[in-house]
Image (cartoon, grey):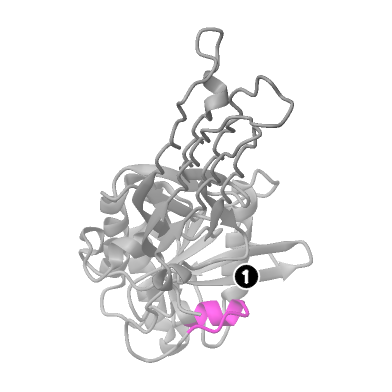
Amino acid sequence: MKFLDRARIFVLSGAGGAGSLSFRREKFVEFGGPDGGDGGRGGHVFAEAAENLNTLIDYRYQQHFKAETGGHGAGRNRTGAAGKDVTIMVPVGTQIFEEDEETLIADLTEPGQRVLLAKGGNGGFGNARFKSSRNQAPRRANPGQPPEERTIWLRLKLIADVGLVGLPNAGKSTFLAAVSAAKPKIADYPFTTLAPQLGVVRLGPQESFVLADIPGLIEGAHEGAGIGDRFLGHVERCAALLHLVDGTGDDVAGAYQLIRREMGLYAAHLSDKPEVVALNKADALTEDERDARVAELAQAAGRQPLVLSGATGAGVDRVLGALMRIVRNEAGEEGDANDEDGWTP
């Protein structure tokens, strides 16, 4: 299944049915009078968050959604049938914007959450509604109200416990594949991952969290370089971050600072998220090189980084333990997010 996190759709509610202009005419009924029924209500258009969806790919192939028109009223005071509603199912974490892509209509963050996008028109009154002592034979009936139509944008921001960030080729996909059942594409060139990937990390029967691999960010991502601003949108939903730095790079401090700067320029609150910093690809370094890189990264990050190798699995357990403690802490459970020692899977 392809991943799509942005879609433009058109929605149209149902028009209300027309009221009926009718008079009762029956043998042996001396005074028939008006008996035109009301028209039915037009169908509404809703959006609802569904837990089993994680992409907007369906809306690449269908962009128009139209609810049913209300039925017309009829004689003998019969009301028209209400039009059927249309419900658009979207993934949890979907934001709905007006056509200008700036005015937020709704943010669906919980499964089953619904929002009305277009209200169906009310049905028109039949002539039975207008009878009175002064007008006993009204020849008047209302048409139904017109429908509502609007063009909207759907923007998905994945909801995950932990977001995996770093420069291209930092080893994020390798790490995700090593700790979960996800099967991201892995290659020895940058920008292998073109869309966010989700994986569930299970540490025990009652301990697990969702890890999101955010595609590699580059300088200028907050301004839309590449499609980095869309990737940064997924980081907003994460409770914590795992910042992987390529230990084989020439400037590990600069790599760390670049990502932090881009996140801060995109949204200031991203810099306040709990973060675990880890030096990756330790298996490709000598002991002296590893110590030098760790010291350089510690000075840039203001904390001691963890050391791991996604390829060999060395140090991975310790990183997962630190992340699990942060997830528990953010959920209000017991556990010290800063305690990095003594954890075993």
Q: Is 329 on the left or on the right of 153, as rendered?
A: right
Q: Residue at x 43, y 67 (%)?
A: 59
Question: In the rendered view of the protein, which quadrant contains the C terminus?
Answer: bottom right
Q: Residue at x 57, y 32 (%)?
A: 36
Question: Residue 170: x percent and y percent?
Answer: 38, 78
| Residue 172 higher or lower than 109, as above or below | below
Magenta region includes residue 183: yes
Q: Which residues are magenta?
A: 174-184
Q: Which residue is mark 1?
A: 200
Identify which residue, 184 or 72, lies in the foreground.
72
Query: How many numbered badges does the structure rendering display?
Result: 1
Q: Residue at x 34, y 73 (%)?
A: 216
Question: Residue 113: x percent and y percent?
Answer: 59, 47
Say if residue 75 shows up in the picture: yes
Q: Residue furthest front?
A: 28
Question: Residue 12: x percent and y percent?
Answer: 41, 51
